[in-house]
Image (cartoon, rainbow, N blue to C red):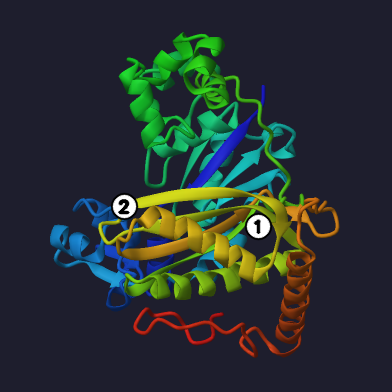
Amino acid sequence: MRTILHCDCNSYFASVEAMLDPSLKGLPLAVAGDPQSRHGVVVAASMEAKKFGVRTTDTVYAAKKKCPDLVVVIPHHSKYSEICDRINAIYLGYTDLVEPFSVDESFLDLTGSPALREKSAKEIADELRARVKAEIGITISVGVSFNKCFAKLASDMKKPDATTVIMPQDVERIVWPLPAKDLLFVGKSTAQALDRLGIKTIGDIAARSRDQMTEILGKHGAGLWEYATGNDTEPVRSYYEERQVKSVGNSFTFSRDLVTPDDIRAGINMLAATVCGRLRRKGFLAGSIQVSIKDPDLKTIQRQRTLEVPTHLQREIADIAFELVEENRKGGPVRLLGISCSDLLPEGEEVSQISFFDEAGETAGREKQEKLEDAVAAIKNKLGKDSIKLGFRRAEGTGIPEGRG
């Protein structure tokens, strides 16, 4: 039987901000973008703020209505990454099988760790909590179990600064009565679909057969059945293992709503420039493009298109993203746009299947654009990312930084 830990920092962004500025400790605190630039969405809240009902994704306006004394600070992402590295360094003193799950949480596999010869898994979890608190200055919650799914479930059960253990004999008593939405990868829409079928708890999922869950939700349903029954065998990867890049993307919340096609084109071009720059630096071509569109009411839709020919060309990605946005916003205002490229293929491995009826001019035009963007990328690499950009009309008042593009 494996011994898996899931270590989750409590209110991480807010905890780091209070650590950087001790005067914030004990105050109802929210981390959010600048409300004046409409980045006013809460991305993290302290335990004190959560007591007032302040939650992630609240607007700053809504959060302050819940908690008039709320203190709002802007995020310092570079600090979050730096402190995350220091926390993972503590974990690596116990095992090299440390797999970051996000910026503030990691899985640890202690199965073969020498530390287990002298201490129980719970004792190690308690020691990790004490060390992170003493050496870093924030608290963590730790889940201990025999697989990744239940270890994460356990860490979520008691917060802050707690250790929770779920062993095989505990599953029926502790796990199965929990709501189905508490299971890993059960999102809102999946939970609603399960609820309509009378599947309300994790135990209800486990009570179905694997084939039944596959029939209901396809491959995803089979995976949920594996999780619910405790048959999750996914390994914890080594911290030093090279991570496969699965997607490259970027999003931006604008200072005012984008209304006209020119507004949308300006926003899309800025995002496409950033995303294509990252694709080139990582040496990938995109096989599919996804756009995210958020309206002023914070309703988000996402649309995706698979490409016949993989690309990293800014013009092509921008054109496709613009078409997707215009087809789906239906003339409505846009608060946020995002572009994400996935189905990535290393440069040099693509196969461009050119139609028999493809006009020579179209192929020549693509090759010309490739040379142009190669030249722009070379100048940026030599003189800096803001030294040159492909020109496009700028929409005034949107908040797009002058250097973007």
Is the N terminus in the top left, top right, bottom left or bottom right quadrant? Answer: top right
Relative to 277, 256 lies left or right = left
Is any atom of residue 374 visible in this view? yes
Label placed on residue 128: none
Cα distance in 3D space between marks 2 and 1: 39 Å
Instruction: Please report the residue visible at 43 percent of the width from the left and 63 percent of the height from the top.
Output: 337
Instruction: Please report the residue visible at 28 percent of the width from the left and 70 percent of the height from the top.
Output: 72
Residue sitting nearer the eye, 48 or 242:
242
Mark 1 lies on a secondary structure that is helix
Can you give x and y, in whole percent of width and height, for residue 14 in the image? Answer: 37, 63
Please name the amino acid that badge 1 sits on.
Ala
Is the C terminus in the top left, top right, bottom left or bottom right quadrant? Answer: bottom right
Q: Earlier in the sequence, mark 2 or mark 1?
A: 1
Residue sitting nearer the eye, 373 or 139:
373
Can you give x and y, in whole percent of width and height, for residue 143 in the image? Answer: 50, 36
| Label 2 with label 1: CB-CB less than 8 Å | no
Relative to 25, 187 lies left or right = right
Q: Quadrant of residue 286?
A: bottom right
Please tell me how crowded label 1 is: few (under 14), some (14-19), or many (20+) other residues with Cα within 10 Å.
Answer: some
Can you give x and y, in whole percent of width and height, for residue 75 in the image? Answer: 41, 70
Q: Which residue is mark 1?
A: 89
Please tell me how crowded label 2 is: few (under 14), some (14-19), or many (20+) other residues with Cα within 10 Å.
Answer: few
Please name the amino acid that badge 2 sits on.
Lys
Mark 2 lies on a secondary structure that is loop
Q: Which residue is mark 2?
A: 299
Where 178 falls versus 105 (above or below)? Answer: above
Can you give x and y, in whole percent of width and height, for residue 246 in the image? Answer: 66, 50
Is any atom of residue 136 visible in this view? no
